[in-house]
Image (cartoon, rainbow, N blue to C red):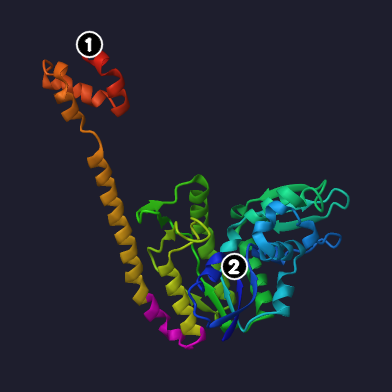
Amino acid sequence: MKKISVIGSCVCRDLFMNDEGNFEFHTDIRFSSPISMLAEPVKSIAVSFDHLKNKAMDVNGNWFKKTLINDINKTAFDALKENHGEYLIMDLAEARMNIATITFANTNEKLLVTNSGLFRKHYRYNLSKNIFKNSKIEINKVYALDDSYWMQIIKDYSKKLLEIFKEENIILVKTMPAIYYVNQNGCLEHFSTPSHCSEIFECSILLPKLYDYFIQCCPKAKVIEIPNNFVGDSNHKWKTNPFHYTSTCYSYLLNCVKEIIINEKNNQLNEVFSKYQPILENEFKMASEKTIESFYGNISNQINYKEVIDSVEEFQQLGRKKRMRILHATNKKDFYKHWKEYFKN
């Protein structure tokens, strides 16, 4: 059984959902931006489980709370050093999350934390009322940071990781957000909420640069590319999200990891990629075709206004042109509500 650690988004952990016991996990760090992990702690502040007792948050479990504690106390790298696997599975997708700067009124100290959904919930329910009471919080947009800043962050981040893991034992998954997802009916839908659209657009600019920077810093690290046409899954156990893929994509990623760690055949990654690329393309195509079929099926089920107008006895004395004007001037709701008024005019 191979011992591994995980740092990054849910993709790096979810790819093991269908593993058959080949891997043993040691320290799983998620919901933490590299910026926050590298930031200095505030010596006068230390968050513990005692500060996260609100019952409304218990559904998150102790693992989530421990993750948040490591992010706030800046103990993530320490946790890795104390208990880490031989291999590291990582991505840089958590860098997309903004940073919260907390300024403490009494000491004027500043603390940087990852503004994840988990942090926001605990801040609202717990932290703003106890350990962060009377502090000021400011949200910093990471997409406003320039390339030189990010390059230094990735350089420092990779240096920290190389203190713990051998460079050749680091596996970088080039995680990107999916643009489409397969809905409950098997049809293809575009992530269309403003937050998702913004996230996808901003990630498409930021993440490729960060991956390039990391590979420059760790050229011996193994790199797993994600094929085109990968899609999200509305049936994912963590709900619909651009970073929650279909099982086919996770199967591809897991096979890549196995080739690297178990079979020790890094040169086989291209073969795995070539095998799964058409499978993912076919998954995309089938969902697209089902979407088109559903679309035309819905159209065929709509009322044919021409047939309806032609069937109304009072309309028979009207000429075809006037009946067509009525057809184009109405929609289904207005037609049934106002057809007599249209006729009189």
Residue at the disc numbered 2 = 8
Residue at the disc numbered 1 = 344
Q: Secondary structure at mark 1?
A: helix
Main secondary structure type of the part rendered in magenta: helix
Q: Which residues are magenta?
A: 261-273
Q: Nearer the viewer, residue 78 or 155?
A: 78
Could you say which quadrant of the image residue 283 lies in? bottom left
For residue 31, side relative to residue 307 (left or right):
right
Residue 164, percent from left and from top: 68, 80
Q: Quadrant of the N terminus?
A: bottom right
Residue 119, percent from left and from top: 68, 55
Residue type for callout 1? Lys
In the depicted structure, whether residue 336 falls above or below residue 163: above
**Magenta stretch containing residue 263, yes or no?**
yes
In the depicted structure, whether residue 325 falls above or below residue 59: above
Residue type for callout 2? Gly
Density class for disc 1 (Cα within 10 Å; few <14, some 14-19, many ≥20) is few
Residue 16, percent from left and from top: 51, 74
Identify the residue shown where x is 75% and y is 69%. Answer: 75
Q: Earlier in the sequence, mark 1 or mark 2?
A: 2
Q: How far apart in space, not on screen, are marks 1 and 2 (Cα)?
A: 68 Å
Q: Secondary structure at mark 2?
A: loop
